[in-house]
Amino acid sequence: MPYPELYNWDSCAQFVSDFLSMVPLPDPLKPPSHLYSPTTVLKYQEGNCFDFSTLLCSMLLGAGYDAYCVNGYGSQDMCQMDLTRDVCPLTVKHQEVVQEEEKVPPKKYAIKPPRDLTSRFQQEQETKKQEEIKAEEERQLREEEERLLDVEKAKTDPLHGLRVHSWVLVLSGKREVPESFFIDPFTARSYSTQDDHFLGIESLWNHKNYWVNMQDCWNCCKDLVFDLGDPVRWEYLLLGTEKSHLSLTEEEEDGLNDDDDVENLGKEDEDKSFDMPPSWVEQIEISPEAFETRCPNGKKVIQYKRAKLEKWAPYLNSNGLVCRLTTYEDLECTKTLEIKEWFQNREDMLELKHIDKSTGLNVDYFKPGHPQALRVHSYKSMQPETDRIMEFYDRARVDSLVKREETSKTMTEYYRGRSDFLSYRHVSFGDRVKKLSLNSAESNPRPIVKITERFARNPEQPADEDVAERVFLISEERIQLRYHCRDDHITASKREFLRRSEVDHKGNKIVMTPDMCISFEVEPMEHTKKLLYQYEAMMKLKNEEKLSRHQAWESELEVLEILKLREEEEEEHRLTISIYDTKRNEKSKEYREAMERVMHEEHLRQVEAQLDYLAPFLAQLPPSEKMTRWQAMRVKDECLSDFKQRLIDKANLIQARFEKETQELQKKQQWYQENQVTLTVEDEDLYLSYCSQAMFRIRILEQRLNRHKELAPLKYLALEEKLYKDPRLVEFMKVFV
């Protein structure tokens, strides 16, 4: 197959399961009387379990697997493709491997943690209460499951163990398959050879041979040995040269080293060998359109236990939806719990939409390439200033923003790998002073009350001068700084500035005083105690506070921009089309049609050039009489005269068009001179545009006329020479050459 997706057994089985529609056997107790070829099954896109298995086995053999079609007996659910008792594989949550963090050895000198004053008795009671509630919920769920199992057991299948089914067996060995397993072609699931769904095997076959099972299936397929080289367990139909070999132990292999026995065995089998004739079935071919469409008519619905899975072909839905998984609370599938929707080929790079109906939480997942570098968007409402979480591809952003959490009163941002070592910013908002009908960050921004910023360690600066946390208490007019702690210290330096206005109410300038800076330094230094140093530090912090407030305001505007962009994307939901998809790509289609039109015109031009130029003049002669020299001269003269007249007419036509364009331009220029004073700016622009276009046309006509005057004599001489060499006139022109 020319598709890499069909090289592995799981994706190959999934394709067969999606591509075909299941048709039950006419008689559930008997295998079909004949089998359709894989090409026929692909053509009609439907079949029974034997058709599914034949197609899947053919594709697996082509991919290099040791695969066999199996004729046996299965459970009722498997034979009827009833998945209402099975859990959907997409709902199974994979257990994440939690990596244990390495415990940092405690320092020799460390601060003891504060004493825990909470009541252990209350904690134990609360834990016990939670465990009782959880146990009660598990008991109720277990009772419900047992009740359902009892109901299912009451509905026993009267044909249990007699229902005929076909599936695929993949033996270990080839393609690095470590252990043999079964594949159900209806569901594309793999099962162990010990699974209870498979109740027995009658026979199996591939493209080379047919084997009949001679083993007892009283314990289903659990005790079967799939050693096809053992004629006691598997009776073969054709004794071919490529039959499976008996699996032997080392001791048994040592006992068969006698050369005479081997030669005798070869002589006995030499006359009885018979190979399977070559297949007369056509080669399996799947068109790119069929491979992309997958499901019959582009849609397929599978009902699971408390879940429904819907699949669509790409580009079938205008919004790019290709898969939807709906999970329900009850077995009747009436109360929706959550919805997951997968998308493809979206221009906004939307990949997955998760809707939780119980909490109202929506989570959108995006692939790399979104205009705002959005990765995950969690929200309950698209209205601004509501609870939401936005995660970004930090490498695609200039500010290296990783995540933004927003509530009605706060906004928290996380950064990674910034040059200024900023890693965290938390902004607290107050109530708006003005009450407007439409409040937004542009028209009526929320007042900022507090900004908290945290920085990673800068190794180029001393820890006592490297700020770890910076808090702007805007409403209280205070600025708090906390520096990084040195490795050999247990406390960090702190500093607090009282941010006052530079002038008082009388307009007098306020002088920096020692009480405006409160500091705690682990190792005090002389220069930090000076008022000039403190003043410069406070002025720098004031500028940084303005910058932080501006960045917080820009973050609010960016949130509004993203929300507006997401609303537009959901309304338009435009899809991307590859340039290689010539059927859907309109630009490529228009270009191809234009090229075909140019080629067609070129072909017509070539055909016209190959037309007989003497045909109109020879048609005037009597058809039965032989041409005389006088008639030949007349035909030549008339042809040259007609061609000369056509050249003159063409020159006159170009000259007439040239004169017409020139006169119209002169009239327009005269009109402009008469009305130049009263013209508006738009009229002048229109006049200048007209003059530019008119001059362009006049220049082109002039060039065509000059070129025609140059080429006309050459064309006339070329035609005259061609007439002299024409085989119909050459006999009469020899005298004049």
Image: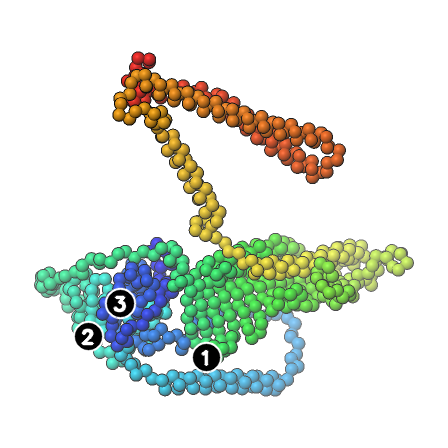
Circle 3 crowding by C-alpha within 10 Å: few under 14, some 14–19, many from 20: many
Tell me residue 706's x, y (percent): 52, 22
Tell me: 41 left or right of 519. Answer: left
Of pointers 2 and 3, the one earlier in the residue sequence: 3
SS assignment at label 1: loop
Q: Are marks 2 and 1 in contact (CB under 8 Å)?
A: no
Q: How many marks?
A: 3
Kind of residue sitting beneath label 1: Leu
Going from N to C along the chain, the mark reached first, 3 or 1, is 3
Residue under label 3, please give it: 69
In the rendered view, does 310 fall on the left or right side of 490? left
Of labels 2 and 1, earlier in sequence is: 2
What's the distance in space between the residues labelled 3 and 1, CA to CA? 35 Å
Q: Nearer the viewer, mark 2 or mark 3?
A: 3
Q: Which mark is residue 331?
A: 1
- Disc 3 marks a residue whose amino acid type is Cys
Is 209 in front, or is 522?
Answer: 209
* Residue indicated by mark 2: 214
Element at label 3: strand
Mark 1: few/some/many CA within 10 Å (<14, 14-19, 20+): some
CA gap between label 2 and label 1 equals: 42 Å
Mark 2 crowd level (few <14, some 14–19, many ≥20, 10 Å Cα): some
> Which residue is depicted at the point 45% across and 72% down?
308
